[in-house]
Image (tube, rainbow, N blue to C red):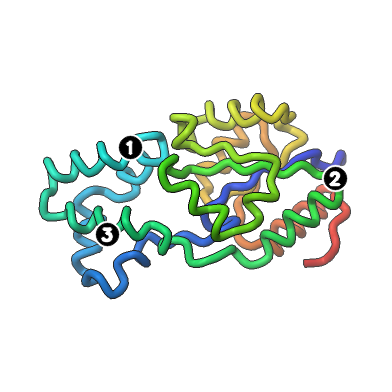
Amino acid sequence: MTAPEAVVLDLGNVVLAWDPYLPFVGRMERSAVDAFFADVDFAAFNHRQDAGRSWADARAEVAERFPEHVDALDVYVEHFAETLPGPVPGTEQLVRDLLDAGVRVVGLTNWSAETFHHAGRVAPAVGLMEGVVVSGEAGLAKPDPRIFELTAVRFGLTPDRTVFADDSPANVEAAARVGFDSLVFTSADRLRADLVARGLDLPPG
């Protein structure tokens, strides 16, 4: 087995934790937040933000279709930083160990271009990476295969010599179809073990 030359990491819940409920704690009842998320179909709504829609356009849509939830959206956007409670344990050290071993590390994240600046403030590992492809800037979001192709081209990666790790099985499957050696992320320790099994010389976590 030839050891990987590069590792591409998702960010949310791989490098830093993300919980969309946190901005509402102490500001809105959980039942009202659940109603907001259900009515706007938050997963699909958020995916559109990740794919490049502006928050101004999102607010205009909510105001038109669900005016009762405009205040909830405003709370979410104004307090977005609170969705990020901190780094995922062990990932920053893994990134440092990969770099020390001469392995390139790149980020690939589904994230709104307007809120991505918060990521590096919460997780120093983001700043250690060679670079990050941000879906909201690219106008493409995982699992669209084009964003994996874009990442490979932008950083000159050879997919079958590159490990891609993401907590979303759908994204992992999409990356595999493009040719990446793809893994579902469950913990930094598990990813470290998987990378060692692929021939990388990494210290224990």
Compare residues 191 and 59 and report the one nearer the observer.
59
Cβ atoms at labels 1 and 3 below 8 Å apart: no
Q: Amino acid at mark 1?
A: Ser
Q: Amino acid at mark 2?
A: Gly
Q: Which mark is residue 54?
A: 1
Compare residues 195 and 137 and report the one nearer the observer.
137
Helix, strand or loop under label 2:
loop
Q: Amino acid at mark 3?
A: Val
Q: Quadrant of residue 53?
A: top left
Compare residues 45 and 78 and report the one nearer the observer.
78
Q: Label 3 vs label 2: CA separation?
A: 43 Å
Locate the N terminus and report the quarter of the image it occupies: top right
Helix, strand or loop under label 1:
loop
Helix, strand or loop under label 3:
helix
User: What's the residue at 48%, 36% (across, down)?
Assistant: 135
Q: Earlier in the sequence, mark 2 or mark 1?
A: 1
Answer with left or right where residue 132 lies relative to residue 31.
right
Q: Label 2 vs label 1: CA separation?
A: 38 Å
Q: Is residue 163 above or below residue 26?
A: above
Pointer 2: what residue?
102
Q: Position of residue 33 (x, y in %)?
A: 24, 63
Q: Label 1 vs label 3: CA separation?
A: 16 Å
Task: Count how many numbered circles sit on residues in the image.
Answer: 3
Cβ atoms at labels 2 and 1 below 8 Å apart: no
User: What's the residue at 19%, 52% (across, down)?
Assistant: 39
Q: Is residue 93 above or below residue 175?
A: below
Pointer 3: what residue?
75
Answer with left or right where residue 99 lies relative to residue 170.
right
Q: Position of residue 22 (x, y in %)?
A: 37, 67
Q: Residues within 10 Å of mark 3 (few under 14, many from 20)?
A: some
Locate the C terminus and report the quarter of the image it occupies: bottom right
